[in-house]
Image (spheres, grey):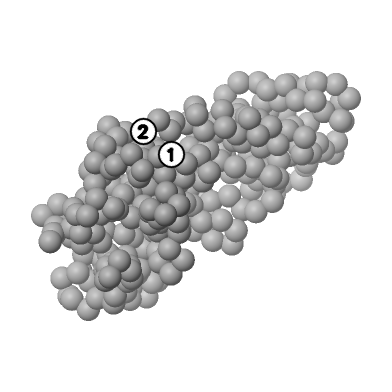
Amino acid sequence: MVSSLLLTGCAVNPSDAGQNASQESTQEGASNLDSQHLSALDSFWLQNFAGYSYLYDIDGSGDPLLLVAKPSEGNNASSGAFEVDYYKFNPSSSTYEQINDLKSSMGGTESSQQAKIFLDKSGNLYSSTVNKNKEVSVKKLVKSNDTYSFEDVQDEAVLKMAQSDESNNDTYSPVPWNGKLASKGTSLNKLREAKASQGKMVIKGIVHFYDDEEIAKAQGYLNPNSPSDKKSTVVVFDQPIYFSSPVAQAPRESYMCALNGSKVNSFYDGKEVYLAFDPTKVKWDNTTAMPMGEPRISDYEFLW
């Protein structure tokens, strides 16, 4: 039986994953699922919040895998890569559970390993990597006795698909990742409300990787520090936010914050996000470290 795709939508470049995907196509794909699957998707997204999603039904059974791509963190954050996890619906618990043995990646830069996930014209799904020496590796997703795995592919036509920069709908296309939640009822507003009920503050803003001069310019100050190429990750709020500041010993107005801790994936640079964090754990600095006089946040989540 030919593989069927529950989600349709415009194909997108991995570097813009989900930015141009269609919400209508997401809802249309989800409408093919029964109520148990839809409820499980609602619960999944409220717990896991962020990620570009794709539902893939390998054999037309109506029981698709859920693929979730999230920007890499830590040491791989600067590469612009995504990690892709696979989840399968468990009818006993009515939840989507991760398949630990299935992993893929997506994205990357010219100087690093590049990866993508794509479909051929028959709907078969492949995961490929091309290293900096232009050596290509391709694996095909297969299902046997309700177990999923990747098999190595040596077919020259498929290898060429993996190396091509241009999608060709007559031959193959990138997986059409959707940037919105994949089930009925779940929305970003609902998600923000859930985080607020946990005592989190949720703020909308734009992520920037700025050096001290750029931060000073954004703040309207002269940079008091020595010139440096070091970049900091800041979120510029879409409107002023009032915080209680131990430094000022009074509520103060903030226009941006610095994100400390693990590296933020370069994908987020210039992107609008909803930043969720515990306001009781916000730190303040009374030095000339940029951004001056603004909060430092280490424990946070991006909702998008």
Which residue is labeled 2 in the image? 184
Query: Which residue does the image show at 53% across and 51% down from the upper left?
Result: 265
For the residues labelled 1 and 2, the Cα–Cα distance comes to 7 Å
Query: Which residue does the image show at 71% across and 25% down from the upper left?
Result: 254
Residues tagged 1 and 2 counted as in contact (Cβ below 8 A): yes
Q: Amino acid at mark 1?
A: Asp
In this view, the residue in front, 268 or 71, is: 71
Residue 253 sits above or below residue 196 on the image = above
User: Relative to 171, is 268 on the left or the right?
Assistant: right
SS state under label 2: loop
One can see residue 217 in this view: no
In this view, the residue in front, 34 or 20, is: 34
Answer few, some or many: residues within 10 Å of disc 1's Cα (few below 14, many 20 plus, some between 14 and 19): some
One can see residue 225 in this view: yes
Q: Which of the 4 image quarters holds residue 181?
A: top left
Answer few, some or many: residues within 10 Å of disc 2's Cα (few below 14, many 20 plus, some between 14 and 19): some
Q: Which of the 4 image quarters holds residue 244?
A: top right
Q: Quadrant of the N terminus?
A: bottom left
Q: What's the mark number on residue 42?
A: 1
The picture places residue 57, in percent across and down from the top left corner, at 25, 54
Comes first in the chain, label 1 or label 2: 1
SS state under label 1: helix
